[in-house]
C-alpha cells in the first residue's frame, strides 16, 4: 500500500502539535496498523502558516492532484481539522477519496472511512470543527466590538494626523488586553486643519485640492491629493470632538452611540463597523450600522464644524438633474482637445457669475486641479474655438477638397467597374459534381455490380466528395468577398450622407449630435498655448 501523510499548523507555537510531531505520530500509526508498510511508500505533505478555513494551501493542493491520480491508497492525518474546518470543503474531499477507494484515517479521533460508522462519525466531527471555527470568529468579533465601545483604536492604518501607540489595559474579566491609542502627528494634523478650514470657506473638494497643490502638500506616499481623498478626510469621524453637536448628529442618523450628554467633552470619536470588509471594495456602510464611541485621543474639529462639513458634502452630491461638466450641453470639444504642455485633456468650464451669453473656456485638467503650479498652459475661449474647428471642417469638406474628390473617385470605381463575378462558374461546377454523384448513386441501386466495379464507383464517389468540399469552400470565400464589396459601397454611401449632413444640416443638430459627428471626423485636437492643431481621421 501507498500512504500520504498530511500535516498543517497555522502558527508555529513550539507546542506538542508541531508539523514534525504530527508527521512522526502518523508514521507510527501506519507502521502499527499496517506491519508490511515501508517508509519509501509514504509521501508527506506539510503546510505551515496556513489556516484550515480555506483549502488554498500549496501542499494541500499538490496532495489533491496526487489524489486524483490515485497515487496513494490511504490518507493519514493527525487530527480531522488539519484537513479542513469547513464542512463543505471537507465533504467534497471525502467524496473524492471514496470515489477512488482511498481510505482516510484520523489518528486522534480514531476515524476510519473503511467502516460505515467511521464515515458517519467523520461527517459529524467535521460539523463540530466548523462550529468551533465560527465560534472563535464570533468571540473575536465580540471582543472587537467591546474594545470599540471603550473608545480604543483597534489597529490598522492610522488616519492622517495620527500615529498609533500600543497600550495595555484591563478590559475583559480582569484579563490584560493589548489595545492602541492615537497620538497626534504635529506635521500631519496641520494638514487636517487646513483641509477643514479651506473646505468650509470654498465649499468644494476640488478647490481644496488646488490649495494643497499650490502649497506643495502631498499624501504620505508622495502623491497629489485627489478630491476623493480629501472627501475621505472630511468624512472621517476620528477628527470630530465628542460634544453635544456630534451626539445629536449621530443619534439623528441612527448610529449606535455609546456615550451620553454627561460624557461629552474634548476627546475625539472612534467608530467601528464603518465599512463592509467582507466585500472586495469594502464599501462604506450606512450610519445606522456604525458603533460610535468616545476615543482616548483629543478631538480636533468641534462637532458643530464637523457636522457643517457633512451637510455641505451631502448637499454637493449629484442629484441627477444638473449635468456634469464633461457631459454638458454647451461645448462641442470638451475632452477632445489635448494640452501639449502636460499631455492632459482639456475640458469646458463656464465663466462664473452672470453669464447670459453662455460663454465658457477650455482649461487643462491638470491646471484645473492645481492651477499654474501644475500647468501654465493658457485657456482657450470656448465659443470661438468651437467656431474655428467647425469652420475648418466645413472648408475641409467642400466639394473641391481632396477628401471629397477621393470619395467621388472611389464611388465611381465601385459602381462603374464591378469586379467580374466568378460565383456563377463555381456554382456550375458544384451542380455538375452533384449531378455525377446522383448518377453514381442511381447506378448502385439499379444494377448488380461486380466487386471491381463497386470499388471503382466508391473511389470516384470519394474523389467527387473531396472536389465538392473544395468548391463549397471557394464559394463561401467568394461570397465573403462580394459581401465586403457591398459593405464598401454602403460605407462610402454612409460617409457621403454623413458629410452632406455636416455641411448642410450641422447648424440644426443638437450639441450631442454635433459632438458625435466631430468625433467621427477628428482624431485629435491639440493646443500648445499658441496654435490649435487639428488632426483629421485618415488625414
Image (cartoon, rainbow, N blue to C red):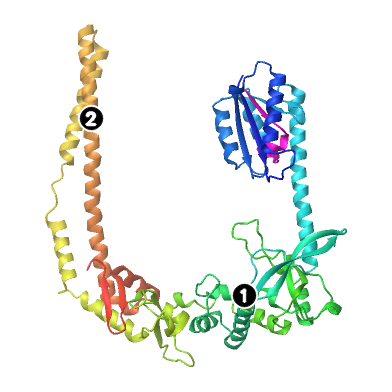
Q: Residues within 10 Å of mark 2 (few under 14, many from 20)?
A: some
Residue that numbered label 1 is attached to: 233
Q: Earlier in the sequence, mark 2 or mark 1?
A: 1
Residue sitting at x 24%, y 16%: 458
Determine which quarter of the picture holds residue 146: bottom right
Up-down: is 238 above or below 357?
above
Return the x and y of residue 416 as percentages of the image width and height. 12, 57
**Is 172 left or right of 516, judged from the image as shown?**
right
Residue sitting at x 27%, y 75%: 534
Residue that numbered label 2 is attached to: 468
Residue sitting at x 19%, y 76%: 398
Query: Is residue 283 a member of the stretch shown in magenta?
Result: no
User: What span is in magenta?
Assistant: 73-90
Marks 2 and 1 sit apart, C-alpha to C-alpha, by 74 Å
Q: Nearer the viewer, residue 268 or 509?
A: 268
Query: Is residue 79 a member of the stretch shown in magenta?
Result: yes
Residue sitting at x 28%, y 83%: 388
> Among all residues in the image, which is located at the extreme front?
14
Amino acid at each position: 500500500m501507498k500512504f500520504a501523510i498530511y500535516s498543517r499548523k497555522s502558527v508555529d507555537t513550539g507546542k506538542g502539535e508541531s508539523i514534525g510531531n504530527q508527521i512522526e505520530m502518523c508514521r507510527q500509526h501506519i507502521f502499527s496498523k499496517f506491519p508490511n508498510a515501508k517508509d519509501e511508500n509514504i509521501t508527506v505533505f506539510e503546510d505551515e502558516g496556513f489556516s484550515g478555513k480555506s483549502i488554498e494551501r500549496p501542499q494541500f493542493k499538490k496532495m489533491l492532484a496526487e489524489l486524483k491520480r490515485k497515487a496513494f491508497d490511504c490518507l493519514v492525518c493527525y487530527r480531522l481539522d488539519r484537513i479542513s474546518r469547513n464542512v463543505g470543503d471537507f465533504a467534497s474531499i471525502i467524496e473524492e477519496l471514496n470515489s477512488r477507494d482511498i481510505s482516510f484515517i484520523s489518528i486522534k479521533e480514531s476515524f476510519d472511512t473503511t467502516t460505515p460508522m467511521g464515515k458517519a462519525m467523520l461527517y459529524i466531527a467535521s460539523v463540530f470543527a466548523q462550529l468551533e471555527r465560527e465560534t472563535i470568529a464570533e468571540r473575536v468579533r465580540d471582543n472587537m466590538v467591546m474594545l470599540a465601545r471603550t473608545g480604543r483604536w483597534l489597529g490598522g492604518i492610522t488616519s492622517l494626523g495620527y500615529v498609533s501607540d500600543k497600550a495595555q489595559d484591563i478590559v475583559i474579566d480582569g484579563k490584560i488586553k493589548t489595545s492602541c491609542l492615537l497620538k497626534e502627528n504635529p506635521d500631519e494634523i496641520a494638514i487636517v486643519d487646513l483641509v477643514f478650514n479651506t473646505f468650509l470657506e470654498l465649499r468644494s473638494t476640488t478647490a481644496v485640492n488646488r490649495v494643497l497643490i499650490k502649497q506643495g502638500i502631498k499624501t504620505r506616499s508622495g502623491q497629489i491629493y485627489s478630491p476623493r481623498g480629501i472627501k475621505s478626510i472630511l468624512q472621517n469621524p476620528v477628527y470630530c470632538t465628542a460634544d453635544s453637536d456630534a451626539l445629536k448628529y449621530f443619534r439623528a442618523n441612527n448610529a449606535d452611540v455609546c456615550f451620553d450628554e454627561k460624557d461629552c467633552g474634548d476627546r475625539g470619536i472612534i467608530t467601528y463597523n464603518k465599512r463592509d470588509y467582507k466585500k472586495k471594495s469594502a464599501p462604506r456602510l450606512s450610519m445606522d450600522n456604525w458603533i460610535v464611541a468616545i476615543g482616548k485621543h483629543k478631538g480636533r474639529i468641534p462637532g458643530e464644524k464637523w457636522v457643517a462639513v457633512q451637510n455641505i458634502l451631502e448637499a454637493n452630491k449629484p442629484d441627477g438633474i444638473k449635468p456634469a461638466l464633461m457631459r454638458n450641453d454647451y461645448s462641442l470639444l470638451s475632452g477632445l482637445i489635448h494640452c501639449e504642455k502636460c499631455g492632459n485633456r482639456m475640458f469646458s468650464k463656464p465663466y462664473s457669475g452672470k453669464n447670459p451669453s453662455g460663454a465658457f473656456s477650455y482649461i487643462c485638467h491638470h491646471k484645473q486641479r492645481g492651477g499654474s503650479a501644475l500647468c501654465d498652459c493658457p485657456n482657450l475661449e470656448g465659443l470661438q474655438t468651437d467656431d474655428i474647428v467647425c469652420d475648418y471642417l466645413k472648408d475641409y469638406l467642400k466639394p473641391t477638397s481632396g477628401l471629397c474628390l477621393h470619395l467621388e473617385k472611389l464611388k465611381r470605381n465601385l459602381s462603374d467597374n464591378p469586379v467580374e463575378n466568378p460565383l456563377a462558374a463555381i456554382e456550375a461546377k458544384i451542380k455538375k459534381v452533384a449531378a455525377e454523384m446522383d448518377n453514381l448513386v442511381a447506378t448502385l441501386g439499379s444494377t448488380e455490380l461486380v466487386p471491381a466495379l463497386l470499388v471503382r464507383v466508391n473511389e470516384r464517389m470519394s474523389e467527387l466528395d473531396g472536389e465538392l468540399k473544395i468548391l463549397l469552400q471557394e464559394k463561401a470565400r467568394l461570397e465573403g468577398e462580394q459581401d465586403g464589396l457591398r459593405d464598401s459601397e454602403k460605407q462610402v454611401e454612409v460617409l457621403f450622407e454623413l458629410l452632406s449632413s455636416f455641411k448642410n444640416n450641422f447648424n440644426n443638430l443638437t450639441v450631442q449630435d454635433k459632438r458625435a459627428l466631430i468625433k467621427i471626423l477628428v482624431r485629435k485636437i491639440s493646443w500648445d498655448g499658441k496654435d490649435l492643431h487639428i488632426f483629421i481621421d485618415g488625414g
